[in-house]
Image (cartoon, grey):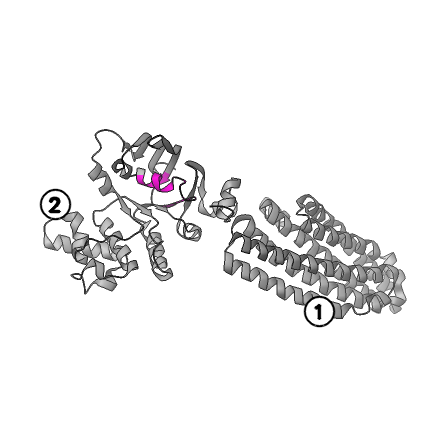
Amino acid sequence: MENTIKINVENLNLYYGKKQALNSISLGIQRNTVTALIGPSGCGKSTFLRSLNRMNDLIDGVRIEGNVFLEDRNIYDGDTDVVELRKRIGMIFQKSNPFPKSIYDNIAYGPRINGVKAKNELDEIVERSLVRSALWEEVKDDLHKSGLSLSGGQQQRLCIARALAVDPEVLLMDEPASALDPLSTSKIEDLIFELKNNYTIVIVTHNMQQASRVSDITAFFYMGDLIEVSGTKKMFTTPDNKKTEEYISGRFG
Amino acid sequence: MQEHYNIEIEDLKKSLMRMAALVDEQIERAMKALRDNDIEVIKGIKAKDLEIDAYDNLIQTQCENVLALFQPVASDLRFILASIMINNNLERCGDIAVNIAQRVKKLTGNHQLLVESNLVEMAASARQMVKDAIDSFIGRDSQLARKVLQSDDVVDNLNREAFKYALSKMESENILIEPCAHLIVLSRQVERLADHATNIAENLIFYVEAEQVTHKKKLAKRESI
């Protein structure tokens, strides 16, 4: 099992002011798998997700202890280039947030910032990203239309394409389908399944069926603790912890 | 949502209990006829089986509804899966009670064959297995269920003995060929009853302990070859 861990979290403690939100979390996230983070509201799962690409740095009063290794580098080392880090670890949010620009420019934005200027190269990145996010066929003739003119599900896939355009290694998804209708949700889930061949994916979801459908590994958080982590099949059939069973069976949360 | 779910599960449990009670009654009647050569007791047994069939359909629908509406997981899911299987086995037990009653009727003039072939003893064992299997389900008692599994071999052996006994009787006395043919079928029915009790017990263990014990012995044997 050598070299299967993409992100290794060691004893991660996170405080919002005096309140501790994550209690000594240790978790190895395996490469090319989908890891689902589940748990009731306020359990720390989104906080944990955001700490994987240092999004919590932007919040006042947050203090973090512990290590998060992306391969062999601790991302919390003082000399980490956070912009470079977020290029390697992309993020998709619950609410799709395309820029008020064309579909093309939404995707070309990141590569342009990173110095890609040649039109043919940008064209190629835009097409490849849209193909990978399963949106190409629907928008290939309308690339200069506004990203905001797309449907909710298409906008979310556009955001995924935008994240893919800078060639990340990891995708963090914070409830990526919770605002979408069942058909769009199903497309996003198919996409996640497809993307794991090339990316490591961590997804926060409130939808238990979604976690069980798309993930290989499930981690259950409760009150800032990581209660249980195991293969998703085991988690949803014979979890080890009573609290996990109560949560996935809808007994609380 | 949770409350709504609990109501559905309680309704399903009630249906299963009522069905199990009906099946138990039917088997008791068939067994009394077999043991005491009393065919009065089996009057109306076939009509009563229709009630069991109606529960079979009802329980299947209840399980389908719970799966479709609540998507249960873990032990909740195992309960529904076990309920579907146990329902199926209970329904088969009901059918077998009717079959046993019909065979016993045909053997009323030769009841001594049932005694001599140890079929009465075998039927008592199978009857106890069904009773224990049902009790284990009602009480979620996997220890009792494991006791049922152990009893199956006893019934299988008695079935083989009864078969041999019937064959030897058929060879020695022509007049006993027909009753002994009925005896063999009857013995097979009783043996099937024990098999269904075993299935019920296995499903209870799956539900309570999350362990699949079905076919375990046979598969282990194959692996060791």
Question: Which structural element holds mark 2?
Answer: loop
Provide residue A170's location: percent of width, then percent of height: 29, 44
Q: Tell me, yes or no, if residue A125 can be seen here.
A: no
Please say whether residue A38 is one of the residues in the magenta stretch: yes
Query: Is residue A59 rendered magenta in the image?
Result: no
In the rendered structure, which amino acid carries the disc numbered 2? Gly
Is residue A34 placed above or below A150 in the rendered structure?
above
- Residue A156 in the image: above or below residue A14: below
Q: Which residues are magenta?
A: A29-50
Left or right placement of residue A20 versus residue A251 in this view: left
In the rendered image, residue A121, in percent from the top left (x then y), is placed at: 13, 52
Q: Secondary structure at mark 1?
A: helix
Visible in this render: residue B91?
yes
Circle 2 sits on which residue? A115
Q: What percent of the width, then of the height, locates residue B44?
A: 79, 70
The amino acid on which the numbered mark 1 sits, given as a three-letter code, is Leu
Quarter that holds the N terminus of chain A: top left
Of labels 2 and 1, the one closer to you: 1
Q: State the image coordinates of residue B194 (x, y, percent, origin top left).
A: 73, 55
- Along the line of sight, the residue nearer the viewer: A117 or B178: A117
Subunit ID for the residue under disc 2 = A
Dividing the picture into quadrants, the one containing residue A132 is bottom left
Q: Say whether mark 1 and mark 2 are on the same chain.
A: no
Residue count near mark 2 (Cα–Cα under 10 Å), binned few <14, some 14–19, many ≥20: few
Mark pair 2, 1: CA separation: 79 Å
Residue, x 68% and y 51% (percent of image)? B138
Q: Classify residue A68 as left or right of residue B6.
A: left
Residue at mark 1: chain:
B
A69 vs A252: above or below: above
Q: Which mark is residue B50?
A: 1
Furthest-front residue in this view: A18
**Location of residue A59 by image quarter:** top left
